Amino acid sequence: MTSVLEEEGIRPVRAQHRFDEEALARWMAENVDGYGGVMQVDQFQGGQSNPTYRLRTPHASYVLRRKPPGVLLKGAHAIEREARVMTALGQAGFPVPRVHGLCLDDTVIGSWFYVMNLVEGRIFWDARLPDVAAADRRAYLEAMNATLAQLHRYDPVALGLSDYGRAGGYIARQIERWSQQYLQDEVAGRHASMDRLVEWLPEHIPANDEVAVTHGDFRIDNMIFHPVEPRVVAVLDWELSTLGHPLADFAYNLMMYRVPQEIHNGLLGADLAGMALLSEADYVRTYCRESGRRHLPDLEFYVVFNMFRFAAILHGIRGRNLRGTASSANAQEVGDRFALVADLAWQQVQRL
């Protein structure tokens, strides 16, 4: 069986992301059970923040994620957090790849990294699911929804993640963090809608506060589905995970209904009924059912907050591209979309 990971998005390693493969092989031999044989290294086309590689051996395939080279923003690219949360969640039965090892020694390949299993299955790059039979599309969206609800039901203390983030005040801290990164990255430039959101958001934070393990970038192309069943077998890309507000995490996932296809795998403007996809209202009801909630208070605020945060992330990609440290070949195209997302967020505010 060949995974979608192996069929799409694989490229030779970019020049700025090459490393000493022999040094990695020595580390693998010492730290990865069952490793052996000659290793072939390729790079995934994605991985806007942390360069991601496929490692193939005669007996197994792995994925390596590392911090990018160059000057990095403080607190960004925390691959050690990704490895920690996936290890804890995997032990609890949540669908994540198995982490084999974490290296905090810059001298091995030039930056910190970790190695995990390459999980076989399907990755969907289009939330409209054109390659899935119409009768099955609803089940795939429901599976994604249920997986996020499952994550939010875990007790961080029971997972050993009580110190994975600060308990409470997540929204205020996030607004401050992304506002600062936006304002401090002068290379990436400014935009009027972002400036307005920086002022508006802190004044409208909801009073209710909850704490759960949150993914931070939960979308359909960050998970692997079973090869033939509508079932999630692995959730990927945990760089933004923390102890946060579960409704903010869900609103980020829900944001796909508020943006166009070229952004965030969006569904805005799509004929949802004609394509047999869940409506936004049905998607919200599904999460309420799966998470045991009656309703989702202040959901519109959390959508605006996430559109702002996503715009700030794109702004950071734009800055890295202009500084020459971006991890992806399409970083310019992606980063230049930050203004569009900011405009959409401010339009949401004006409709409240």
Image (spheres, grey):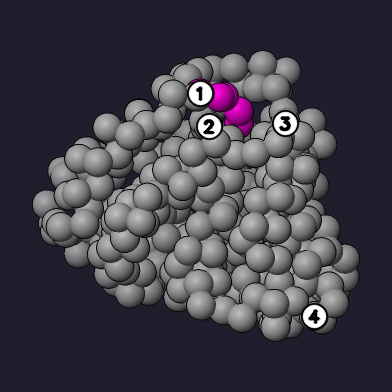
Q: Amino acid at mark 1?
A: Asp
Label 1–label 2 contact, CB within 8 A: yes
Quadrant assignment for the N terminus: bottom right
Question: Which of the numbered marks, if any, corresponds to residue 153?
Answer: 3
Mark closer to the chain start, 2 or 3: 3
Q: Residues within 10 Å of mark 4 (few under 14, many from 20)?
A: some
Q: State the image quarter where residue 2 is shown.
A: bottom right
Label 1–label 3 contact, CB within 8 A: no
Camera-nearest label, 1 or 3: 1
SS at circle 3? helix
User: Residue drawn at (74%, 50%), measured in percent from left and top?
Assistant: 286
Q: Position of residue 161 (x, y in %)?
A: 62, 22
SS at circle 4? helix
Q: Position of residue 346 (x, y in %)?
A: 29, 56
Mark closer to the chain start, 2 or 4: 4
Q: Amino acid at mark 4?
A: Ala
On whether residue 212 falls in the magenta region, the answer is yes
Question: Which of the numbered marks, if any, corresponds to residue 58?
Answer: none
Q: Residues within 10 Å of mark 3 (few under 14, many from 20)?
A: some
Mark pair 2, 3: CA separation: 12 Å
Which residue is under mark 4? 134
Using the image, determine if residue 27 lies above or below residue 203. Answer: below
Q: Amino acid at mark 2?
A: His
Mark pair 2, 4: CA separation: 33 Å
Which residue is under mark 2? 245
Which residue is under mark 1? 209
